[in-house]
Amino acid sequence: MDYTLLFIQTLNGVQLGLLLFLVASGLTLVFGILDFVNLAHGSIYMIGAFVCASLTYWSGNFLIAVVLSLPVMAVLGYLIERVIARRLYARDHLDHVLGTFGLILVMDTSAHLIWGPEGIAVPLPDWLNGQVTLFADVVVPSFRLLIIATGLTIAAGLFWLVNYTRLGMLIRAGASNRTMVAALGIDIKTLFSLVFALGAVLAGLAGMLVAPITEASISMGGEIIITAFVVIIVGGIGSMKGAFIAALMIGLIDTLGRSFLGDIFQLFMSQDAAETSAPAISAMLIYIIMAAVLAVRPQGLFPPKVR
Amino acid sequence: MKRLLSAALAATMLTTPSWAGEVKIGFVTTLTTGGAVIGNDQKKAVDLALEHIGHKMGGLDVNLIYADDGFKPDIGKQATDKLVKQDNVTFVAGYIWSHVLLASRKSALDAGKFLISANAGPSPIAGKLCNKNFFSTSWQNDQTPMAMGEVLNQKGVKSLYIIAPNYAAGKNMVAGVERTFKGKILGKDMTKWPTQLDFSSELAKAKASGAEALFIFFPGKAGGAFIKQYQQAGLKDVLPLYTVFTVDALSLPKLQKAGFSDILGSQFTQEWDPSLDNAQNKRFVHDFKAKYGSYPSFYAAQAYDSIFLIKSAVDAVHGDLTNMDGMRAAMKAANFPSVRGKFTYGNNHFPIQNFYLRQVVKDGDGNWTTKVVKTVYTANQDPYHAQCALK
Amino acid sequence: MGRLGKAGWVTLIVMLALLILPPVLLWSGNEFYLLLATRLVILAIAAVSLNLILGYGGMVSFGHAAFIGIGAYAMGIPVYHEFYGGLPGVASTNGFFQLALAVGLSALFALITGAISLRTKGVYFLMITMAFGQMVFFLFQSLSEYGGDDGLVIEQRSELPLVSFDNPLSLYLTSYAVLVAVMLLVWLIVNSRFGMVLRGAKGNDQRLITLGYNTYLYRLTAYVIAGVIAGVAGFLMANFASFISPDMMGWSRSGELMFMVILGGAASVIGPVLGAAAFVVIQEVLSSWTVYWHLPFGIMLILIVLYGRGGVMGIISGRGSAHRRPDE
C-alpha cells in the first residue's frame, strides 16, 4: 500500500468535499428554511466564477477580485429573491422547478452573450501558483491548501452563525414556524431575502475558488447542481451538519473511488474487465451511495428534527 | 394559443424557394453551449472560405445555411432533417462530434445528399458504415494518437501513464496510442466525461507511478483545466506531457493570458499546422489572423477545406447539381488545394495524409502558437479501411 | 361548451389537429414537419405516462428518461446482433419481439427501482429516481460493444405486419394511435377505483392507509405502468431516429419530460400532450429565429410560472391556482 498516495488522495478528497459543501450549504439553507427548490443555484455558482474572472483581469489580483465579487453575488441573490423566488414560496415544488429552470436558461444564455462561449482562465498570484511540501514526498499545490482552509473557515462560520447568533436563531425559528416568527414582530421577508443572498454568496464563492483550477465556463453550473443536490439529500435537507458530513463523504468516496477502484477490482477480475468496469462504477458511485442511503434512511442521514 | 402556434408554424415554414442558380450547403456545428467555441471557429473559417471563393462554385451562387446541434445527437439529427427535407440542400457538412455525426448520418445519406465531416471520425463510419456519399476532411480517431505512440518510441520513452476521458473518442485515443507505443504502460485512468474537470487524484497517481511520460487526451475546456492543474502540481520536470487534441489555437490564447507557461515546448501530433508551407495554408492563416485577430484552430482548417472540397465537386460538373456521380468522382480525386497540402482519399473516403509533430512556441509577436517539429507519418491510412466494402 | 367540458373540447381539437395536420404537411411537401410531429407525438406518449405518476400520483420522478432509453436499447440491441452476430438468442428485427423486450425490461426496471424509491417521498423520491436514471445512463455509456457514448446506428427498423416504419407517415400514424391508446388507458386508470385510491393517496396518504388500502402497492403498480408506457415510447423513438445513445436518458432529458408535464398542466390527460407540443414547437420556432433562443424561452417559462398557474391547461381553463401547495 502506497501511504503517501493514500494521504494525498485523502487530501484531494477533502478539498473536493469542501468545495461541494460551499455549494451545498447555500442550497440546503434556501431549501431547508425557505422550502424553495432552487435549480438555478448552479448558475449562481457559474456567475460567481465569471464575475471573479473579469474582476481578476480588471484589478490584476485574484484575491482582490474575490473580495469585490462577494457583494456582487449578494446583490444578485437579493434581486433573484425579490423578483422571482419570493412570489413562488407559497407554491408547489413543481412550480419552483419550472421557474428556476427558466432562470437557468436565462442566466446561462446571458453569460454566453456577455462573456462568450470560450470561458475564461483565471491567473493566480505566484505564491498561490506553486506547491507546498508538507513532509517527505507529500507535495501539494498551494492553492488546494487555500481551498481547504477557506472551506473549513466558512464551515465553522456557518456553524457559529446558525447555532449561536440571533440571526441564526431567527433562521431556525423561521424554518419551523413562519407565522410565529412574524407574529413576534420579526420582518420575515427581510430575513428570507438575507438567507437567499447568503446562499448566493456561498455558491458564488465556490465558483470563484474553482475557476483558477478549471476555468469560468458557461456549462459549469449544470455540472455541479446535481452533485450539490445529492449532497443535501444524503445529508438531510436543511441540515447544515448533514451537508458538511455528506459533502466530505462524497468528496472522499468519489476521489478515492477514482483512484483505487481499478486496483481493487483487479483483485478479483481480469485486468481488462477491471479497466472497463472501474471507470463506469466510479462514475455511478455517488448515485449508488445516494440510492443506498435513501433506501435505508428515506429522509437522509441527518433529517431536521421538526418540520 | 392554438392560433398563435399555427401562425408561428406558418412563419417558420416560409423557406426560401430553391432556384436553379444556386448551390445549397448545410453546415451543422455547435453554436450554443460551451462547444460553441469550436463551432464559432469553424463558422469563421467557412465564412472566410466563402469570401475567398467569392461566394461562387461552378458558376452558381453559394447559399450556406448554418445549423446548431446544441452538442446533442437528436438535435443534430433534427437540424440535418430540416436541411435535407425543408431546405433541400445538396451537401451537408460540419459535424464536430462523433455521436452527432452517427445520429445524423442516415438522414443525410438516405436522402441522397453528400455528407462531409469536417471533424468527427468515429471508426464505424470509416469501416462497416462507410458510404459512397460520405467524405471526411479530417481524420479517423485512431490516427493521431497512433502517430503520438510512434513519436514516443522515437524519443526512447520506456514507460507511460495515460489519462483520458471515459467515452468513445477517449477510448479510441487510448487504443490508438497503445497500438503503436512499444514501451510499458504503467497506469491508465479513464475520467468521467464531460463533467469531471478536477484531475488532482489522477495527477497524483500518475506521479506516484514513476512513469517517464504522461499521455493525455482532453478536448475543449477540459484540456485547459488539465494543463493548469498539471502546472499547479509542478510536474513539468518530473513527468513530461504529450497530448492529442488537447492544446489548440482556441485554448492557447486563454492559457497565455493567464500565464500558464509550462505548456510552452509541449508536443502533440496532428495532420495540420498553421506553419505548413503551402500557398493555400499561407493565405488561409494570414487572412484568418487579419480578419479575426487570432490563429485558426485545426477545426477551422478542416472546415475551410470542406468548402474547397465541395467547390471542387461543383466546379467539376459546371454547376450541374443533378450529376451526383460526377461530383462524387471529383471529390474522390481530392483535387483541391488543401491547407494540409496534397493528400489522397482511401476507399472509405477518409484522407490518406501526413501526420506532424507540433510544438507550442512563441511567434514573432510574442503570441503562443505552434510549429512543425517533424513529419511522423507520411501518407498514413486509418486502420479501419479494410472493413469498408467500397473499392 | 356542452357536456364535453373545456378540457374535453381541447382534447378533441388537439387530437384532431394532430391527426389531420401532419399528413397535410407531407402532401404539401413539408416532410420535415411530419418528422417534427412524430418526435412530438412520441415525447407526448412519454409525458402522458409520466403524468400518470406525477400529476395523479404525486410521485415526481426525475428519472423517467431511463425508461425511454431502456425501450430504445431493447429495440436497437437485437438489430445490432442480427447484423453483426453474437447473442443469437436476442438477435432479431421482429417488432413484436423487440416490443416485448422493451415492455419486459422497463417493467422489471420499474419494479425494482420503484420498490426501493417508493420508500421515500417528495424531493427524496425525485432524487432517488434521478440516481437510478443516472446509473442506467452510465451503464450504457460504458457498454462499448454498443457504441458507448457515441451511440449505436440502427441498421433496420422494426418489422411488423401491415405497417412499415420506413414510411414516415406509417410511423407517424402508428405513434399517433399509440398516443391515443395511452391517453385512453390513463383516463380509464385515473377514473377507476384504482385511480381514486392513487389520487386520494396523493392528497392524504394517512387517511387511505387507515381505510385499509396498501397505498405503497397502488403507487408501485402505477409506477410500473408508467415505466412500461415510457419504454414503448423509447421503442418508437429508436425506430424514429434509427439511432440510440445514452444521451436519450441523461437527467436533463428526464427534466425535459418533467417540464413538458408541468408546462402543459399536470393532472389532466391532455395537459402533457400540450406541454410536449409547446416544448417542441416553441423550441423549433425560437431556434429558427436565433441561436440564443434559450433566453426568450427561459423568460417565457418564468412568466408562465409567475402568472399562468397550472400550465397551458391552467390558462385555457382559467383556473387560478392549480399549483397551490396541498396542506400537510
Image (cartoon, rainbow, N blue to C red):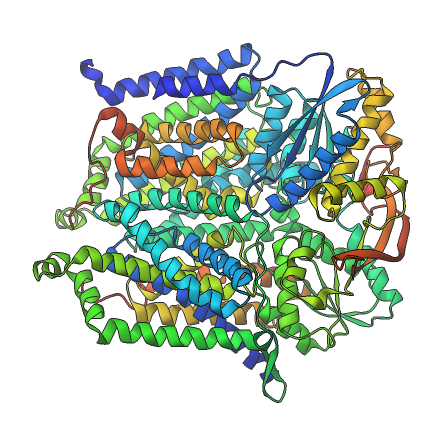
Residue C95 location (% of width, % of height): 55, 29
The reply to whether residue C11 is in sight is yes
Q: Is residue B44 left or right of residue A285?
A: right
Residue B127 placement (x, y as % from top left): 77, 40
Q: Residue at the location (87% across, 26% down)?
A: B330
Q: In this view, does A243 lie above or below C193?
A: below
- Which of the 4 quarters of the picture holds residue B175? bottom right
Instruction: Work out which quarter of the rendered image holds the N terminus of chain C and state it.
Output: top left
Q: In this picture, is C83 found above or below B200?
A: above
Q: Quadrant of residue A190?
A: bottom left
Determine whether, in the image, residue B171 is placed left or right of residue A100.
right
State how many labels appear. Answer: 0
In the displayed structure image, the side of residue A65 where residue B248 appears, left or right: right
Residue B246: x and y in percent read 70, 56
The quadrant in which residue A73 appears is bottom left
Q: In this view, does A257 lie above or below C69?
A: below
Q: Position of residue A104 (x, y in %)?
A: 42, 46
Most distant residue in the left direction? A183
Q: Residue at x 42, y 55 (%)?
A: A42
Q: Is residue C41 above or below residue A261?
A: above
* Left or right: residue B324 compared with residue A216: right
- Asked whether B265 or C264 is in front, the reply is B265
Whether residue C242 appears in this view of the structure is no
Front residue (pair A73, C133)? A73
